[in-house]
Image: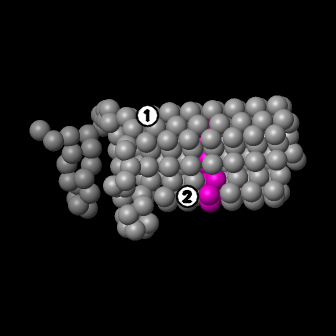
Amino acid sequence: PSPFTVDENGWWVAEPKMFRFPQGIVIGERYDNCTYGEAVLAVGLLDENSGQGNCPSGDGSVAFGAANTASGKHSTVTGGSINHASGDVSSVSGGYGNKATGQDSSVSGGVYNTGAGQRSSVTGGDSNQASGQDSSVSGGAYNAASGQDSSVS
């Protein structure tokens, strides 16, 4: 028997039970050039990117938004477009063209920002880079925090 039924409005409704998807779930567009990881989730609009959907290729990764890639293990990209989270346990929250390449790094938004150092973070702005371990850049443009424990506010 199916765990789904059709309600009075024509919506498919699941029974109030837990579902287990060991491989993953793609909601919206499937990206043919993506090698999906295990236990992943991708969400994007159909045909919005002309065949360039989101790609959660890292095991346990998540990719939302438009043309985003989460290739690090347990990495997430939760919005924006053309963002990449390649470091393990790294994240990009939104914006455009941002990269979280360091392990445990994060970029919150803005454009063309990079969190390259381990546990580094960039909050926003334009073309900022946090490359030192435990470094951070809060915003602005063309700033760099390259030393260990360094910050630019």
Q: Quadrant of residue 121?
A: top right
Q: Residue furthest right?
A: 153
Tell me if mark 2 has few (under 14), some (14-19) or many (20+) residues whose alpha carbon lies within 10 angstroms of its own: many
Residue at point 42%, 58% (across, down)? 53
Identify the residue under disc 2.
82
Q: Residue furthest left?
A: 1
Q: Which mark is residue 59?
A: 1
Tell me if mark 1 has few (under 14), some (14-19) or many (20+) residues whose alpha carbon lies within 10 angstroms of its own: many
Residue at point 57%, 33% (across, down)? 89
Residue 85 in percent (x, y) is at 57, 44
Q: Secondary structure at mark 2?
A: loop
Indicate yes or no whether the magenta region holds residue 83: no
Where does the magenta region start and end? Answer: 90-98
Type of amino acid at the residue the image marks with label 1: Asp
Identify the image's colour scheme: rainbow, by chain, secondary structure or one colour: one colour
Q: Quadrant of residue 150?
A: top right
Q: Which mark is residue 94?
A: none
Classified by dominant secondary structure, the portion drawn in magenta counts as loop
Indicate yes or no whether the magenta region holds residue 93: yes
Type of amino acid at the residue the image marks with label 2: Ile
Residue 13 in percent (x, y) is at 27, 49
Q: Quadrant of residue 102?
A: top right
Q: Secondary structure at mark 1?
A: loop
